Amino acid sequence: MAVHLADLPPDDGLNPAQADAEALLREPREQRPVHRRELRDELRALLDEGLEEVSAWIEKTIFLSKHTLSSVHGCEVRFLHELEQPFAPSAAAVKGAVAHKAIELSVSSAGHSPGKLVDGALTRLANSEDWVGQWLAGADELDRAEVRSMATDRVAKFAECFPPLRSGWRPVTESRWAAEFHGGKIRLSGKVDLTIGGCDGLRAGKVIIDFKTGNRSLTHVEDLRFYALLETLRLGVPPWKVATYYLDSGTFAVEVVTEGMLEAAARRVVAGAAKLAELREGGRTPVLQAGPGCSWCPRFLQCDDGQRARARWEEFG
Ligand code: SF4
């Protein structure tokens, strides 16, 4: 079929992947939901009540992040094993921090190449005193080159598939959110890759975006629902949408945030806190749960269940 230039839509400077991403962010205001003012108090009451029993007997504070929650709701043997190991930063973890910093810099430095943004991020992070700065200070040339290469790949994919972040969209990267219950005995926290937009009174407007490499996973959905809960507890108005953006494929998994979703997320937090406390202090026998993550489990070589499960998955392709 012949296509004439006159039939083509006007060029907005965006490729189709960028245009798809922008469409996510540009629905008319009247299509965004307006929430009830009481919602935050109701969620807080649900969490207060659900966490009361466990907070009464635990000896140490429980910290719940998206990673802790997905771990404790997965294989309990792996969860306990990792709980006992001291935190050891890896090149892969540092790469994520560097890439996020570079994306943050791209908001104020439009037009810079991914490599230049990553170099800027590396310089800034190397001067920080947190674990990223400490890792970079002790890294040799090869480690730094590996981080630079991985982070540049991630930032290049972001720049190719995501529309340029305009300051009018109010983009915020690496925002930290937290909530406390029962005098700080139970603490929830999260760090969001990117948020765009904001609420308008009780009308939702913020989009929370998490960037992932690799394949889709159900835990990514749960991670974002947890963030939506944190934002609602903080602000009283839920985000409008939560989205995982898969950098390798340039595709989104998007959900509009609903009250039912937030209530389910709160109940998952309550169940996760109880399980964590029982595993850590209550003598609960951990249950093995083989899954797709077995291949990356530090106990894989000692675990017959995990090895059998992987053999089955390989057999069935
Ligand atoms: S290999 Fe799989 S089943 Fe075994 S401990 Fe690790 S996550 Fe659990």
Image (tube, grey):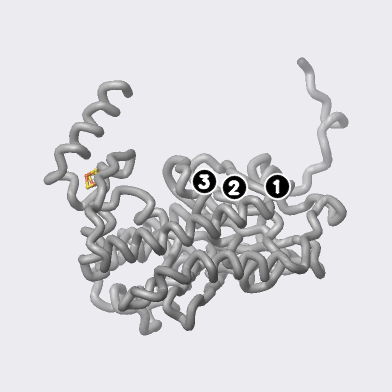
Q: Secondary structure at mark 1?
A: loop
Q: Amino acid at mark 2?
A: Cys
At 55% across and 60% down in the image, what residue appears? 266
**Could you tell me residue 177's position as x and y percent?**
55, 72
143 relative to 263 in the view: left or right: left
Helix, strand or loop at label 3? It is strand
Mark 3, residue position: 246
Question: How many numbered tags mark residues here?
Answer: 3
Q: Position of residue 164 (x, y in %)?
A: 66, 58
For the residues bearing labels 3 and 2, Cβ distance under 8 angstroms: no
Give 69 or 153, whichever is nearer the viewer: 69
Q: Residue 106 lies in what quarter of the image? A: bottom right
| Residue occupying the point 67% across, 58% down | 207
Residue 14, numbered circle: 1
Name the secondary structure under disc 2.
helix
Whether residues under marks 3 and 1 lie with C-beta atoms below 8 angstroms apart, the answer is no
Quadrant for the C terminus in the image: top left
Q: Residue furthest top?
A: 1
